[in-house]
Image: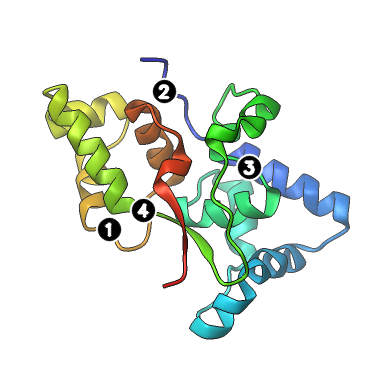
């Protein structure tokens, strides 16, 4: 197995800020653009939009949820793998194995956390690892792993990306365009 590389939320923030600056946008305008990628779904659901603070807080605390990261990655048209520490951003962005599913205005990209849990648990059993042993390998707590079985919303993007690397599959295998 290759080395498991952390997800670099700081690099994701810098990419967002770079594109924001290039386009001459405020953080509010970026949040609006990100949210408006799913206008038809948003009109049906009437849920709350992504907040600019969700984006700007990554400058102080470089972390994000796996679900929020998908909003940002979609706006940047980048893959999760392109933000792994030490990645060749261009190479990982261009490799179609890592391409996220296409999502129109009636969809929002979401992690299939139960599917991620099932694939992780299957490999854990194949390798005869306990949850604490796997947590040590992945650099997280056992609860962060077992909680995916019943998670409704999200886990940290770093945990999700450590899991997919350990499984040996692209993150895109566990992402789908949701309509609710």
**Label 3 sits on residue:** 12
N-terminal-most mark, 2 or 4: 2
**Label 4 sits on residue:** 112
Q: Nearer the viewer, residue 125 or 84?
A: 125
In the image, is 130 to the left or to the right of 160? Answer: left
The residue shown at (18%, 30%) is: 124
SS under mark 2? loop
Label 1–label 4 contact, CB within 8 A: no
N-terminal-most mark, 3 or 1: 3
N-terminal-most mark, 4 or 3: 3
Q: Distance between the residues labelled 3 and 1?
A: 24 Å
* Quadrant assignment for the N terminus: top left
**Label 1 sits on residue:** 151
The picture places residue 158, in percent across and down from the top left corner, at 44, 39
**Label 2 sits on residue:** 4
The residue shown at (15%, 25%) is: 126
SS under mark 4? loop
Q: Can residue 46 be seen in this view?
A: no
The residue shown at (79%, 54%) is: 20
Is 169 drawn above or below residue 53 in the view shown? above
Please rate how many residues cluster around mark 2, counting C-alpha atoms within 10 Å: few if below 14, some from 14 to 19, many from 20. Answer: some
Is 120 drawn above or below residue 166 in the view shown? below
């Amino acid at each position: 197995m290759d080395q498991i590389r952390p997800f670099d939320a700081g690099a994701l923030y810098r990419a967002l800020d770079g594109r924001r600056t290039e386009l001459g946008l405020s953080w509010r305008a970026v949040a609006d653009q990100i949210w408006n990628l799913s206008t038809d779904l948003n009109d049906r659901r009437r849920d709350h939009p992504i907040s600019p603070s969700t984006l700007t807080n990554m400058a102080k605390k470089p972390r994000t949820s796996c679900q929020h990261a998908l909003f940002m990655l979609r706006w940047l048209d980048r893959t999760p793998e392109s933000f792994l520490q030490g990645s060749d951003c261009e190479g990982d962005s261009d490799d179609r194995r890592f391409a996220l599913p296409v999502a129109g205005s009636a969809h929002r990209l979401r992690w299939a956390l139960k599917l991620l849990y099932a694939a992780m648990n299957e490999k854990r059993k194949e390798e005869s690892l306990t949850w604490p042993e796997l947590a040590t390998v992945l650099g997280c707590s056992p609860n962060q792993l077992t909680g995916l079985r019943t998670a409704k919303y999200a886990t940290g993007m770093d945990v999700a990306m450590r899991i997919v690397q350990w499984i040996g599959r692209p993150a895109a295998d566990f992402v789908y365009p949701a309509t609710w």
